[in-house]
Image: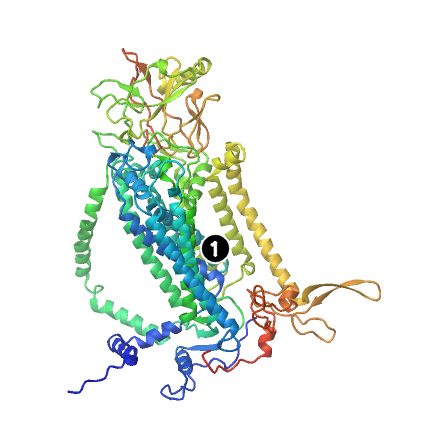
Amino acid sequence: MKRRKFDIAQVPANVGKGVDDRFQAATPLRGLLNKVFPDHWSFLLGEIALFSFIVLLLTGVFLTLFFDPSMKEVAYQGAYPALRGTEMSAAYESSLNLSFEVRGGLFMRQMHHWAALLFMASIIVHMARIFFTGAFRKPRETNWAIGVTLFLLGFLAGFTGYSLPDDGLSGTGLRIASAIMLSIPVVGTWVSASIFGGEFPGHLIIGRFYIAHVLLIPGGLLALITVHLGLVFKQKHTQWPGPMRTNHNVVGERMFPRYALKQGGFFMSVFGVIALMAGLFQINPIWLFGPYRASEVSSASQPDWYVMFMDGLVRLMPAWQITLPIGDGYSIPPLFWPAVVGLGALTTVPMFYPFIEARWFKDKESHHLLQRPRDAPERVGVGAMAFTFFIIATLSGGNDVIADKFHISLNAMTWVGRIGLVILPPLMYFIAVRVCLGLQQHDREVLAHGAETGIIKRLPDGRFVEVHQPLGPVDDHGHPKPLDYAGWVVPKKMNRLGALAPAVKGFFFPVEKPAEAPVSPGMPPVTAREERREREEITSGR
Amino acid sequence: MTVVKDGSHEPGTAPVDVHDPRLSRFEIVKEGARRDDIEIVTYESQFPMPNSKAERRVVRNIALLFLLSGAGALIFLIAYIWWPWRFELGHTISDYYTAVLGISLAISLFSLGFAILAWAKKLLPHEVSIQDRHDAPSSDDDRLLTGQTMAYMVDELGVQRRPLLKGAIALGLAPLGLVAAAPLIGGLIQNPHKDEEPMMFRTGYNPVPNKGQLVRLTRADGSPIRPEDVSVGGQITVFPGVAGGATNEYADSPTLLIHLRAGDAQMARQATDADPKNQGVMWGNYVAYSKICTHAGCPASLYEQQTNRLLCPCHQSQFLITDNARPIFGPASRRLPALPLTVDEEGFFVASSDYRETVGPDFWERP
């Protein structure tokens, strides 16, 4: 029998054939490799959340190997002298051991916590990007609702997570959570007793929060993130208006290799930021708080930042108790309104915003081109209201610290928050709408009259006039022909129009000849260049 | 400005024979992209010629970044293994363990990230591709076919035509669904108002579980308190003198025992005696109020001696002790319950009964 010669160069082709025989992968794989993604810095904000989530999963799994979700009372005998002999729960003891007696354990714990803070921060910034550019419009309403749900799940994941160490601060948070459950009319005591397994704090809550934190909520997050990304993939990413871009195409780069490489590099950079923060900035030093005691709390007890708006709303709520004079009398405590109704409304009403806005504007079209915020002033106004509300509530969550550090009366801070929460959002709506209209007007003005040159000309009759550089062709009198606004940046400075001296690359010495035409980073080329040059035929892969 | 070039994007025209040996690999790639409705509009090198000085410089920098990444990772490993990491009292080199890990790992990850980014952004050719979005809905025929298929399925099952099935399904499946819910509901739901243990309305000071004896007020270590242990104007956190009284088993029981100045005590006595529920709760110039805030259950633990205000640090509710612990600011809507005080024959403080009002955060059925 003749042995066939083994040809190493044929291996990839043979493997490829084998795979395609079995899975018919060639066509979908090529589609995937070739898929075009539009590129803009603001599209990377959601990626930060995704990458933080991956870091959270990695570090979180490590932490579970050492954490003991038990409320059994033990006497601490570990490496931290200040707490030796103190009675504490096994959960708190194992968190201390994780910080002091596991090599690199504190680093992993801080990485997990910082990644969580970054996760929530990037979700909010990403949502702001989606909101202010109108990326939630049809057909992406579902993905917007999923995004809002992801925020709520992240909020719950954060709360259950920082409750687990069972230190003085997190136990206080749990007690407030129990009070919030108690405040629900009719079923409050039943809800609290059922979740805590009896009277607060009971012996079960850490174990229950643990399974919620490591399985149920991450499972939900993972499932929803998968759907979220799958929908982005299926519906294709939105893009900014610009040359060649229409509502029915995607202009950008194919996914492989350049786009995917950039994503990988960005992931490593986000990972690096989290590692740097975890190494340098202390977060949640649980050994300073001591074990949870129902009788002890320190001033400046604040939750993590994304929960502070809830705490702030609870602080600002006036002491309005509703008492129903039936039988022995029933009461609805003031805590119910901000903590149950407030959180419920703030996480569900925004889900329906895309439908509300579409109905308001009677807009039934699909939109794949983004809007500049200034082109939708009312939406920006609504967003400004929401953010003003959020910021005042968050600041009020730390109003005792502000009062302390700035020597302001604590009660004055509360009143500032109460009044501000009512007055400032509508004011910000008005200001934001006016700013948007002003920016719109300025765009139109430059399109009609040209950009300011900074040159003042004196006419023979003594008048002074300012010289404008038209952006487009001019008529017989030298007046610019009016240009239409195209939904994208209008160049307003001479530098953007080619008055800037060509940039020379190189740090100490020039490494190449100056670029032929001045190009400003961050700005799309001015259309005049596009028109002059026909598209080049592509002849090589280089 | 949106510029759409007519005729430039024509997927489906002039297919190329991909087996033509004269084609370069890039031409085959272009053909593949064309079949995916992608037009590669520009694809140009960032360098004027291959292997130019500028290109070699970029390659050198990227190589350097990769090496730096490896160096950072090595520093991390070396520090992880050999840097002293066990906690010691005082200022020692082990304080920097976490910082060294963070900095070295960040150097490694940043270098790797920047190397990859530089590779993609500086070395790879610039590209502009246009892909059809294919955002049109399915064709009317497809919609009709799928809709009819689903309607046909419903028809075939015939639940509409067979009412017996409809009823049987409801009666058969609903109990099974309840079976699924039963262990969850039955096991999880707790009655907060059990007769033998009315947890919402009983604290550690209740004499009944203490064999009928009045419960002493004790410090956290369990030692009882005599009136002279608390100086005038002073206050102390007390716990029920029962086994585990200072632990979280009695999370509703922490109480603040305050020795008021004579003038303040006069005002406080007037205020408590004016309240039918709180008559006679004071003993001498001493008064004891629940430390558990009626707002959200935090310990209201900041006592302002001069103004006799008690402030809860969680949400800044303030209670005026000399006015029967009335809430005077913040979100709390209910005064703190008072613990009726007396002194037993040995001269130690005891609670003459349990709290007369419900302790802790407010709820619906609080009487």
Which residue, as the protein is rendered here, is positioned at the far left?
A1
Q: Residue at x 40, y 89 (%)?
A: B22
**Relative vertical location of residue B285 with respect to residue B290 in this rendering, above or below:** above
**Image quarter (top left, top right, bottom left or bottom right) of the N terminus of chain A:** bottom left
Q: Pick whichever, A404 or A130, lies toward us.
A: A404
Q: Amino acid at mark 1?
A: Ala
Q: Decide if residue B144 is on the left or right side of residue A532.
A: left
Evaluate whether residue A351 shows in this view: no
* Furthest residue toward top: B345
Count residues near mark 1 (Cα–Cα under 10 Å), then give few for <14, some for 14-19, many for 20+.
Answer: some
Circle 1 is placed at which residue position?
A: A128
Q: Position of residue A53 (x, y in %)?
A: 36, 55
Task: Tell me if residue B291 comes above or below residue A529 in the rendering.
Answer: above
Q: Quadrant of residue B24?
A: bottom left
Position of residue A503 measured from the top left corner of the image (x, y, whole percent): 60, 67
Instruction: Find residue A194 and report its horizontal and vertical position in percent.
Output: 26, 40
Q: Secondary structure at mark 1?
A: helix
